[in-house]
Amino acid sequence: MLKGNVYNVTDFEKRFERIEAVIFESSSTASKAVAQEIAKLIQSKEKLGEKCILGLATGSTPKALYAELVRLHKEEGLSFTNVITFNLDEYYPMEPDSVNSYVRFMKELLFDHVDILPENCHIPDGTLPKDEIFKYCNGYEKKIEDLGGIDLQILGIGGNGHIGFNESGSLQNSKTRLVALDHITRVAASNDFSGLANTPRTAITLGVKKIMEATRVVLMAWGEGKSNIIREAVEGDITNQVPASFLQEHENAVFIIDKAASSKLTRINSPWLVEKIAWTDQLVRKAVLGLALSLNKPVLMLTDADYIENGMSDLLADSGPAYDINIYIFNKLQHTITGWPGGKPKADDTHRPERATPEKKRVLIFSPHPDDDIISMGGTFRRLHNQGHEVHVAYQTSGNIAVADDEALRFASFVVITTISSKLEVLKPGEFMMPP
Ligand code: F6R
């Protein structure tokens, strides 16, 4: 069994981290590394004539991992005949052949493409009558125990820190059971079910206890959307509000994450707190603004003591006193503020972002919902128009969140009517029309 520091992380980097976290350039290289770890485990068990018990997850995160395992089987002869799998969870109720069932997911992504024996694949049964679930869950755990426990458990992580479907509030010794899904989890799944109303409210999940009993746990996470919860789980306190934080107490758990998912870890977000860095202008600006925000002070009010007490004394020694650094950053910030968002005509204002003789521009403003453009940048919008640029807005609503379908359709039909009644002329730049 591979143990501990398989992926070479230095202690220095781990100063703020309570779980081993390994950052990969991309999710695909990370998935390949995890596939290698699994392949080695399967082969080493095979050599010993033993079964390899894998705990598996579904969702978007492990898709590339399963693709790589399939490739290893097809191209490099990795055999799964000694593998027994237990999936973490299944929606309830759920028919196995439904498009959204995890049975179908696992077959389509892994089981149908490797030589695993069908009787060795276990996924919680979403078709049982409710009163049989308790007994069934005990049986699911018993099967795992009889095989000597899970050798390697693959996990994803939910936006709320759930592992399996052990939502916030789950206990560290929770058993395999029927659970109610969190609103956040249901919203995340609602696209697959064509809307929240069709998304299951309950699921069967392996309990935290069985996950913690696995010999090795590999949690994977990709994308910036996971970065906040990764920081909480890795650097925060152990709390049942973030069930993934329980893994801090597991002696052989690792988080495999891509760059984007790692972006809020201290070693990435504030590297000066972890090691001596070469201060670039960009890092100084980031550090000073971060300091001002965390202390809730204006930049110009930061003191020498603030720098020293917050891990920035080397910056102070190089470029201090605080007063000088503060002014330098303040001036830089000032220069990002402009009254000419599209550029200033006939001006040689080289220290500002605008060019001296800007072309007339076509501007496209993306706005999540109708009104966000006005609320968040109405002044800039108007100024761009007044300065003669051609301004368009693209509203990014699909009509299903925050803006109801009928509202979105009303605006769409209004645009069509306006276009037709003006003999297919497109609205002139900056013309604002109100709905009838
Ligand atoms: C799925 C599971 C869940 C997911 C988690 C992340 O079997 O147990 O905990 O791992 O919700 O989902 P994705 O990977 O879709 O972001």
Image (cartoon, helix red, strand yellow):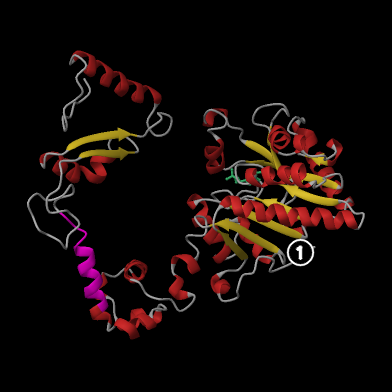
Locate residue 48 relative to residue 151 in the image: left or right.
Answer: right
Residue corresponding to mark 1: 2
Of residue 101 and residue 79, the one placed in the foreground of this image is: 79
Q: Position of residue 150 (x, y in %)?
A: 80, 54
Q: Residue furthest front?
A: 75
Up the image or down, 169 lies above or below 136; here it is below
| Image point (64%, 31%), residue name | 100
19 inside magenta stretch: no
Up the image or down, 231 lies above or below 128; here it is below
Q: Position of residue 370 (x, y in %)?
A: 30, 34
Which secondary structure dominates the residues rendered in magenta? Answer: helix
Res 424 → quadrant: top left
Of residue 187 and residue 341, the one placed in the foreground of this image is: 341
The span shown in magenta is 325-338
Quarter placement of the C terminus: top left
Up the image or down, 155 lies above or below 409; here it is below
Q: Position of residue 384 (x, y in %)?
A: 16, 42
Locate residue 29 relative to residue 122 in the image: left or right.
Answer: left
Name the kind of residue labelled 1 in the image. Leu
Q: Residue furthest right?
A: 49
Locate residue 244 relative to residue 425 in the image: left or right.
Answer: right
Under circle 1, the secondary element is: loop
Locate residue 165 relative to residue 325 in the image: left or right.
Answer: right
